[in-house]
Image (cartoon, grey):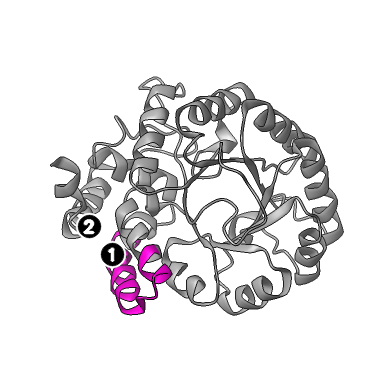
Amino acid sequence: MPQVTSSSRPFGALLSAMVTPFTPDGEVDLDAAVTLARHLVDAGHDGLVLNGTTGEAPTTHAPEKADLIAAVVEAVGDRAYVVAGAGSNDTLHAVRMAEQAAEAGAHGLLVVSPYYSRPSQAGIVAHVRAVLDAGDLPAMLYDVPGRAGVRLADATIDTLAADERVVAFKDATGDTVNAARGLARTGLAWYAGDDALLAQLLAVGAAGIVGVVTQAASGMFRAVIDAWDRGDVAAAQRGYLATLPVTDAVNGAGFQAVHVKAALEVLGLLPRRTVRLPYVPASDEEVDGIRSALRAAGLLDAALT
């Protein structure tokens, strides 16, 4: 398996928060998940995040999560990092998720601040430490105040960054200025948690991205990172601008899991766009808009050839 270290890119550069495919009757479709994971790695991903919000983790159950991790690790774990979400507003639940992820073969954990309950910063530190102790895997902290209802304070980040198991940070705050300060201050590998902010965060030293649209437009995002790495700023800028219409089409309404499943279905990378309540599948009208954006970006034709 890939070796996870506290290097500048401990989990690679291009990662997606992968969807969890379902059968027509709503069961987890492991075959479809393995097929998608292999495609993503073949298309340039060096990491996958499973059982996150985009993976509909709030509505999948513990055995399903463990089976998904084990299947994906077996399929691509020798070629890409498999990071498992261990997020809950119940610390004991998150602890069990971390334990099961480790047992299933995950290479790392994605640890989000407890959502909805809005604990104190001291509570967040205690929560994260409990999860780290349970999984005993390298971890990426995840700051997403729009969903969690609370933002990680700088002092909280610094405290947790002092733990050698914390090697990375997924930033979905939208605050690129504070991201620059944070990555310089902590030495953590910083990852864009918003598809639309990849270029801005690369410019201040980020390691890469944990995206959503990235799984529907792998080659486009890989090209941006590769251009940046070789110092071709103009090509990186052009490539980044080309991703924005696709990002707008998939993420614009705020239902990323729903709409990226629709995009993957249109591209032939997912057999169906089935989701679990409280999500409902993208409407035919929404799918038409996504299809148009994919075609305009040249992704649809490429997928069908």
Q: Residue at x 24, y 42 (%)?
A: 267
> What is the x, y in percent for residue 232?
34, 76
Q: Is residue 219 above or below residue 234?
A: above
Q: CA distance from mark 2 to mark 1?
A: 6 Å
Mark 1 nearby-residue class (10 Å; few <14, some 14–19, many ≥20): some
Which residue is tagged 2? 293
In x, y percent, where is residue 128? 78, 49
- Say which residue appears at 33% left-offset and 61% top-offset: 223
Q: Residue at x 83, y 59 (%)?
A: 120
In this picture, which residue range is highlighted in magenta? 226-247
Q: Main secondary structure of the magenta part?
A: helix
Q: Position of residue 212 (x, y in %)?
A: 43, 51
Q: Are marks 2 and 1 in contact (CB under 8 Å)?
A: yes
Residue name at image x 82 percent, y 40 percent: 133
Q: Label 2 sits on what residue type?
A: Ala
Q: Quadrant of residue 272?
A: top left
- Of the numbered discs in the image, which one, if any, rests on residue 245? 1
Q: On the rendered image, what quadrant is the C terminus found in? A: top left
Q: Is residue 108 left or right of residue 99?
A: left
Q: Earlier in the sequence, mark 2 or mark 1?
A: 1
Q: Foreground residue, 216 or 148?
A: 216
Is 229 magenta? The answer is yes
**In-front residue for pair 40/153:** 40
